[in-house]
Amino acid sequence: MLACITVSNVVPEPQPRLISTKAADDLTYIRSAMERSSAFTAVPGAGGVVTGVIGLIAAVVGARQPTGERWLATWLGAASIAAVVELAAMTWKARRAGIALTGKNTRRFALGTAVPLVAGGVITYDLWVTRDFSVMAPVWLLLYGVGVLTGGLFSVPVVRVLGACFMATGIGASLTPPEWGNVWLGVGFGALHIGFGGYIARYHGG
């Protein structure tokens, strides 16, 4: 008897994906989606780095000013430039990530940040009227820290840590001689912005 045997190439069945791996991926996706929906994630890391550089320049230039008025003008000018940079970087990051800047989380973040900054502006004006420049540095650092910490309640946790560090810097400025104020401002608005901005840019999407 002749037996006809047909030999075909046997293609191995693809191994099923491990259930545990798929579950881990699903959990990561769900956690990411929940974070995006419950937190304002358009805080710009790259913009923070640029703001930090502006802060360091302001600290160097401010230290060389012969009068309190010129020192104040230096820092207010730097703050205005930094605000434009931060808003532009925030808009760019939000558009790239598809995040609306008109949502509930954005309004909460903006309100939490803006209220202490408005208070700081009013106090600064009162201090300028009385020509008391010695306590401006701790006031700015403390209230900016409060604003970042409060706004950070609606953002990623690292923003809250940044706010706490600013408040610690403000406390340091209040406990040291007024002549150190410019150094503390450089540490806060310069070094802290650069360090945390770099972290946010790397781990939170730019």
Image: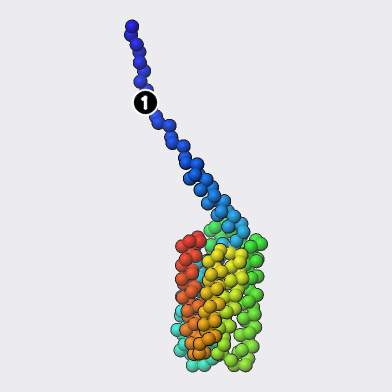
| Place of residue 185 in the rendered image (x, y in percent of width and height, measured from the top left) | 50, 81
- In x, y percent, where is residue 121? 62, 81
Question: What's the residue at 53%, 66% (across, down)?
Answer: 158
Q: Nearer the viewer, residue 122 or 25?
A: 25
Is residue 205 visible in the rendered structure shown here? yes
Tell me if mark 1 has few (under 14), some (14-19) or many (20+) residues whose alpha carbon lies within 10 angstroms of its own.
few
**Front in this rendered view, residue 71 or 184:** 184
Q: Residue at x 60, y 89 (%)?
A: 128
- Above/below status of 127 relative to 110: below
Q: Residue at x 48, y 87 (%)?
A: 180
x and y, in percent, of residue 94 in the image:
56, 61
In this picture, residue 93 sits left or right of residue 113 = left
Callout 1 secondary element: loop
| Residue 153 percent coordinates (x, y) | 61, 66
Task: Specify the color scheme.
Answer: rainbow
The kind of residue tagged 1 is Asn
Residue of label 1: 9
Q: Is residue 62 above or below residue 113?
A: below
